[in-house]
Amino acid sequence: MNKDDTLWKGILENICDDFLKFFFEDAEKLFDLERGFQFLDKELEQLFPTEEIEAPKFVDKLVKVYTKTGKEDWILVHIEVQGYDDKDFAKRMFTYFYRILDKYGKPVTAIAIFTDANKKFHPAIYGYKYLGSKIIYEFNTYKIIEQDETVLIENENPFAIVILTVLLALKKKKLDDESLFDLKYSLAKNLLRRKIPKKKIDDLLIFLQRYITFADQGYNVKFDKEIGELTGNQNSMGIREMVLDKAKKEGEKEGRLLGLDEGVEKATISFIISLWETGNYTVSQIAGLVKVSEAFVQNTIASK
């Protein structure tokens, strides 16, 4: 799983309520968002093992969402984030659908989010017809490159920041670091002015920081400094520190779940990869922070 995959999976879990409200106008009437969500990633992998897919998947999630029916009831939301052209994508979406429906017997809705730059790639229907038998499967789609930035900037839903971040990443190749910095800084200001919980702001800042990186690493430091000044609290935890702290906590949690010896090693590896993916640390710096040899860091990065 690459960096973007990890970021997408994380943000979909961290602001799932906003995701649903972004894509379903009546989400607050349809779903009991206060009850939280169950992410059935392992179950989804069992339904569609990786070896069945010729091309690599990008991000897929299956979310159990409770409804406001007045009784214990729930539906399933299948989410695909696709970043490359795949001629079999629509068929795969249909395969997911019938396997999910067969296993759970619950209502299923699907959303495909396309993050690539190819405007011609936008599958939304799977059709099958043979000797009088016919199937047409349609699913919800959202092509990020086709979206209106002005509309998104005015959209107060926190998930709009995720979409704006990806739009900026798609523009990245055409921009120098200074121009990219100005746009990234403007997007951060847009986020910080919103009246949303601090935890969500932190998660979105991490997504913004790690999804869009600079060729010159000095701009990452500059970005952190400007955000500190923007918030009026330069002593507060910076973005890099938030990433560091988040990776450390995730590593510690993984260690507790796996057991001491195996857990410590896996937590260390997870921590090293998280630090490297920020783009803010050299091999030497990571080795010093984690207290391992540079060779161990290099081997960990090479094998990820």
Image: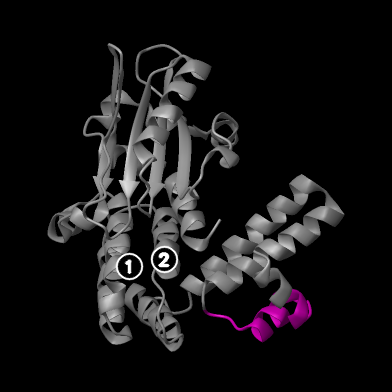
> Are there few (<14), some (14-19), or many (20+) residues within 10 Å of tag 2?
some
Quadrant in which the N terminus is drawn: bottom right
Res 224 label: none
Q: Nearer the viewer, residue 200 or 48?
A: 48
Q: Amino acid at mark 1?
A: Ala
User: Given the current orientation, which residue lies at the most extreme front position?
Assistant: 131
Residue drawn at (26%, 80%), measured in percent from left and top? 175
Quadrant in which the C terminus is drawn: bottom right
Q: Which residues are magenta?
A: 280-297
Residue drawn at (35%, 14%), measured in percent from left and top? 69
In the displayed structure, 238 sits above or below 136; it is below
Q: Nearer the viewer, residue 41 or 261?
A: 41
Residue 190 image offset from top left, x and y in percent: 25, 65
Q: Which residue is mark 1?
A: 169
Mark nearer the N terminus (2 vs 1) = 1
Residue drawn at (25%, 46%), measured in percent from left and top? 122
Secondary structure at numbered mark 1: helix
Res 211 label: 2
Secondary structure at numbered mark 2: helix
| Corner quadrant of residue 154 | bottom left
| Corner quadrant of residue 74 | top left
Q: Nearer the viewer, residue 79 or 88?
A: 88
Q: Amino acid at mark 2?
A: Tyr
Residue 282 forms part of the magenta stretch: yes
Colour scheme used in the picture? one colour
Residue 169 image offset from top left, x and y in percent: 32, 67
In the displayed structure, 3 sits above or below 65; it is below
Left or right, 37 with respect to 124, comes to right
Query: Is residue 246 something that shows in the picture?
Result: yes
- The mark tally for this picture is 2
Residue contact at pointers 2 and 1, CB within 8 angstroms: yes
Left or right, 48 with respect to 89, comes to right
